[in-house]
Image: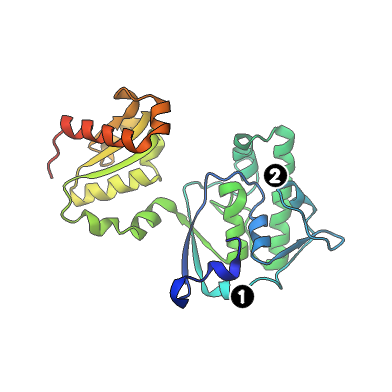
Amino acid sequence: MASASCSRRRGGGGVVTKIIAGVGGSATNDGGAGMAQALGYRLVDAQGRDLERGGAAVSRLARIDPTGFDRGWHSVAVKVAGDVTNPLTGLQGASTVYGPQKGADAQAVRELDAALGRLAEVIERDLGKKVADVPGAGAAGGTGAGLIAFLGASLVPGAPLVVEAAGLDAALRGASLVITGEGQVDEQTAYGKAPGEVAKRAQTAGVPVLLLAGSKGPGWEALETSGVTSVVAMTEEGIDQRQALNEPERMLTRAAVVACRRHKWTR
């Protein structure tokens, strides 16, 4: 969304009216401030100067000026696909939970959390939206909160949204086998993540499911009661991590062939 006026348009003169935004795996921790600036919002300090980019700068936010924002975005329905429920700030917030994963030490975490708190205050005052405690607002360093505030987005569980957009239910009709996968399969796979959602829908349709994984983590057995017929981990098939990362297509094909030779699936 680096260019708001162009991002809404597609080839042939058509205008995009719906957007699914995936949030996760981000190295940011600015509450979507940089995104807002790219969309035309001005984020200024007490002297009226534009804030520089970065999460720490948000602590000096004094005012949000929306006059440069392309109002055409109001006709676009933005849905945010997330797989976390963290609020923007606090002990379960973006900075505290995900900051250390991005290299923030304890002091930086405190500063970033305070900056996001300041952002939430100004958003509520200038834009009339409460974002601090919304489940999922802390996703991607607070980008969830920014999408709500600056684009009027709605946060929804990512896995159901994505599989519905992909037309999975229709594809299941008449299928003999579903193949899905994840880097490391563990207990969390069955709860809220895409492979778990795929397996649940396949189970309802009576279609067996093969899950290909890089490796197995604690609690992976939970998948056996959620529709997964068989789990094949690359690490159990003589494929080491370096091979899997360097040659993912070939290694996945190899694992799938091995699985299909060892197992017989019937509807």
The reply, left or right, for residue 260 in relation to residue 80 is left
Residue 59 visible in this rendered orientation of the protein? yes
Q: Which circle, 1 or 2, is nearer the viewer?
A: 1
What percent of the width, then of the height, locates residue 28?
Answer: 63, 46
In the foreground, 155 or 181: 181
* Residue drawn at x 65%, y 46% as measured from the top left: 29
Q: Which residue is mark 2?
A: 113
In this picture, residue 18 sits left or right of residue 230: right
Q: Specify the quadrant of the image occupied by residue 216.
A: top left
Type of amino acid at the residue the image marks with label 1: Arg
The amino acid marked with disc number 2 is Asp
Quarter of the image with the N terminus is bottom right
Q: Residue furthest right?
A: 47
Image spot of residue 178 (x, y percent): 24, 45
| Earlier sequence position, callout 1 versus callout 2 | 1
Tell me the residue that label 1 is attached to. 71
Label 2 residue SS: helix
Characterize the local packing of mark 1: few (<14), some (14-19) or many (20 or more) Cα atoms within 10 angstroms: few
Viewport quadrant of the C terminus = top left
Which quarter of the figure has residue 168? bottom left
* 220 in relation to 157, above or below: above
Which residue occupies 67% across, 50% down?
30
Query: Where is residue 201 shown, x and y percent of the image?
Result: 27, 50
Instruction: Say how many tags the image has.
Output: 2
Position of 167 relative to 13 (above/below): above
On the rendered structure, is 235 left or right of 50? left
Q: Secondary structure at mark 1?
A: helix
